[in-house]
Structures are given as structure tokens and as C-alpha cells.
């Protein structure tokens, strides 16, 4: 699993490009001090600074670069960049990015138990059927959820990790690599399956969870894409999995007829949060932070404002607001409740 998400990756490359003397090959090689040789030797150099920097970040923070002890080689690149930028404004910007990324990753990797009520504890009843299905014998599992929101996908994967056990289940949040569009060529599903196979081989000590997002609005296209990916995954991996499992979850814009061959894809209900779910999550946060309960009503109203559709809440905005609040709550400097409320938009 990469240390950086796509936006952080672009930001880091831009910061590295501002380092003093970065146009010199020796300086770019210095960024790799401390990186395991097995990782560093796979970088393809071009002698063009910006291309080399992108290659460094992409290679050192690839899906297969995470070490057996759970550490990320890219942190060495951060530390070396900080040394090169010492006593400049750039040093502070690189440190700020590193601290932000470490804080985002901490709940999923460093803490043995997540104490703060994170968004993945919010209204995910649909995951129970998924978790129960995984208790059955088998090495290959596939599920489909008619919801393609990125925040929901991350919360779903986090919650499944929590239930199954973080030491046993690894997931790749690289949605760019597992997103299929209506205009994609017919070969794209096979490419997606090949990438899943590559990840599976690199995660030889853990089960692997792969979220696949289907962006087409047409049910027949979604069905065809899911069928193509799932068939290629089953045909390419079944003999290689040993006792470990691979779990594919298709997240789509709408429901579609589920593939039943070569193995059935299990339908899961879409998330349908309501005001009571928001209130339960807010109350848990307030209790954890030891805040006055009188703040609860204002929080609930701010989170659900403009999101109510009959008895349910609009998924995209609700999860976005939950993650915004959570990022402030888990900051190194605990905020006041009114500060969090002011940031929820």
C-alpha cells in the first residue's frame, strides 16, 4: 500500500523540484540514501530532473515497496530532502507534508487500535454481509456495491480491515489504477486484472482487498466490465493463492446484473445513512474528546444540512464532511468543538 495518495505524490514531486542543485544527478541520487537497494535499483533514470524525481517517488512509494515491518522507503526520501532544504522555507513545507501524510496514515498502520471514532465506523451495515461471506471457505471473493463515492470506498475498505484484522488484510487505495470508464478500450479490464495479479504476488504474506470502481452509468456496460475483470482475475490467480485470499469489491454508479461465472459476485446493499447515524457518530466523537454534549445538535445539523433526501442522506457530502471533521479531530493539536463546526462546509 503506498504511503502517499495521488495528490500528495504530485505535491511531493513539485517540492523536490525546488531543492537546491536538484539539476545535478548526484543530488537526485542522494535522495535515495537509506532506501533498500532492492527498491532503489529498480528506478529507471532519464537524466531529466523532473522525470527522475517522478520515477523516484513512483518507484520508492509503489504498491510493492512497503517493507515487511510495515515501514515505507519513501520516508527516507523525505528525510534526505529535508536535509537538502535545511534553513530554507522549503524545509518547512516538506516537513509539513510529511507530518500531514504520517498523520493520515497513522490510524491505518501505526496504532494498534483506532480510538477516535473514524468515518469508517459510520453507517456501514452493508459490510456485515461481506464480512460474514468471508468466513466461508474459499480463496477468491467478489462483491458489488451500488455506490462509487471515493470517501465511502475508503471507509468500506478500512472497516473491512478492522473486522478481518489489519495484520491479515492489505488493501490498495490506488483507485486510479482500478477505475474503469465507459470510454475505456476493451483491453482495459484485462489490464486492471493484470495489475491485481501483480499486487497479489507482491503481497505474499497477506490477503489482498482490491476496490474496483465502475464509472459508467449504463448497467450493461458495468456488467460487461465487471465480468471481464472478474473472469481474468479468477483464471489468472486461482492456482497461485495458496491459503491466502483475494477480495474484489466492485463499486458502481448504479446496480447491474451480477456475474455468476466463473464464481458468483455477491450483491451488497448501498449505504443508506440517516440522521440517527450521524448523531450516533457525533456523540461518539464528543464522548471521546470529552466535550460538552450541547455541541451535538449543532454538529448534526451542520453535517446533514442540504443532504436529506427522504429518510436517507446524500452520500458524497456526508462522507466529505465526516472526513473533514475527523482530520481536525486527529490533528496533533486537539481543536475546540466550535473550531471543527466552523470547518464543516
Image (tube, rainbow, N blue to C red):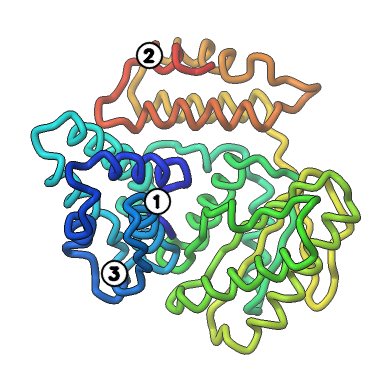
Query: Which residue lies under the disc numbered 3?
Result: 40
Query: Which residue lies under the disc numbered 2?
Result: 339
Residue 221 falls left or right of residue 100: right
Other residues around mark 3 within 10 Å, as few (<14) / some (14–19) / many (≥20): some
Which of these two is toward me, 230 or 309? 230
Q: Which disc number belongs to residue 148? A: none
Residue lying at 71% horizontally and 57% vertically, measured from the top left? 250
Residue 131 spot, x, y in % from top left: 62, 60
Other residues around mark 2 within 10 Å, as few (<14) / some (14–19) / many (≥20): few
Residue 111 spot, x, y in % from top left: 31, 50
Question: In which quadrant of the rendered image does the N terminus lie?
Answer: bottom left
Real-space Cα distance between discs 2 and 1?
25 Å
Other residues around mark 1 within 10 Å, as few (<14) / some (14–19) / many (≥20): some
Identify the mark nearer the N-term, 2 or 1. 1
Q: What element carries label 1?
A: helix
Q: Which residue lies furthest to the left in this view?
A: 87
Relative to residue 306, is residue 237 depicted above or below? below
Relative to residue 172, is residue 155 depicted above or below? above
Residue lying at 24% horizontally and 71% vertically, measured from the top left? 36
Q: What element carries label 2?
A: helix
Real-space Cα distance between discs 1 and 3?
26 Å
Query: Which residue lies under the disc numbered 1?
Result: 108
Identify the mark nearer the N-term, 2 or 3. 3
Identify the mark nearer the N-term, 1 or 3. 3
Residue 311 spot, x, y in % from top left: 77, 25
Determine which quarter of the picture holds residue 193: bottom right
Residue 320 falls left or right of residue 32: right
Amino acid at each position: 500500500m503506498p504511503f502517499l495518495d495521488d495528490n500528495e505524490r504530485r505535491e511531493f514531486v513539485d517540492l523536490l523540484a525546488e531543492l537546491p542543485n536538484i539539476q545535478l544527478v548526484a543530488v537526485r541520487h542522494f535522495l535515495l540514501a537509506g532506501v533498500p537497494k532492492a527498491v532503489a535499483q529498480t528506478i529507471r533514470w532519464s537524466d531529466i530532473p523532473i522525470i527522475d524525481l517522478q520515477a523516484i517517488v513512483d518507484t520508492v512509494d509503489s504498491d510493492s515497496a512497503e517493507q515487511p515491518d510495515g515501514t515505507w522507503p519513501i520516508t527516507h526520501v523525505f528525510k534526505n530532502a529535508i536535509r537538502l532544504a535545511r534553513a530554507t522555507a522549503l524545509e518547512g513545507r516538506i516537513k509539513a507534508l510529511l507530518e500531514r501524510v504520517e498523520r493520515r496514515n497513522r490510524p491505518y498502520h501505526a496504532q494498534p487500535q483506532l480510538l477516535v471514532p473514524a468515518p469508517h465506523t459510520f453507517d456501514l451495515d452493508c459490510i456485515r454481509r461481506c464480512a460474514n461471506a468471508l468466513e466461508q471457505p474459499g480463496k477468491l471473493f467478489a462483491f458489488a456495491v451500488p455506490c462509487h463515492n471515493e470517501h465511502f470506498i475508503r471507509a468500506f475498505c478500512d472497516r473491512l480491515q478492522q473486522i478481518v484484522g489489519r495484520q491479515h488484510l492489505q488493501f490498495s487505495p490506488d483507485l486510479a489504477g482500478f477505475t474503469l470508464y465507459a470510454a475505456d478500450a476493451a483491453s482495459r479490464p484485462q489490464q486492471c486484472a493484470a495489475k491485481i495479479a501483480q499486487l497479489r504476488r507482491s503481497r505474499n504474506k497477506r490477503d489482498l482487498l482490491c476496490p474496483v470502481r465502475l464509472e459508467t452509468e449504463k448497467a450493461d456496460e458495468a456488467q460487461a466490465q465487471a465480468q471481464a475483470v472478474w473472469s481474468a482475475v479468477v483464471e489468472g490467480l486461482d492456482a497461485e493463492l495458496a491459503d491466502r485470499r483475494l477480495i474484489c469489491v466492485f463499486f458502481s454508479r448504479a446496480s447491474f446484473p451480477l456475474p455468476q461465472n466463473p464464481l458468483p459476485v455477491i450483491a451488497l446493499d448501498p449505504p443508506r445513512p440517516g440522521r440517527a447515524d450521524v448523531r450516533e457518530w457525533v456523540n461518539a466523537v464528543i464522548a471521546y474528546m470529552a466535550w460538552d454534549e450541547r455541541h451535538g445538535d449543532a454538529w448534526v445539523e451542520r453535517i446533514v444540512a442540504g443532504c436529506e433526501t427522504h429518510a436517507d442522506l446524500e452520500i458524497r457530502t456526508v462522507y466529505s464532511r465526516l472526513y473533514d471533521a475527523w482530520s481536525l479531530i486527529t490533528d496533533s493539536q486537539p481543536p475546540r468543538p466550535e473550531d471543527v463546526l466552523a470547518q464543516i462546509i
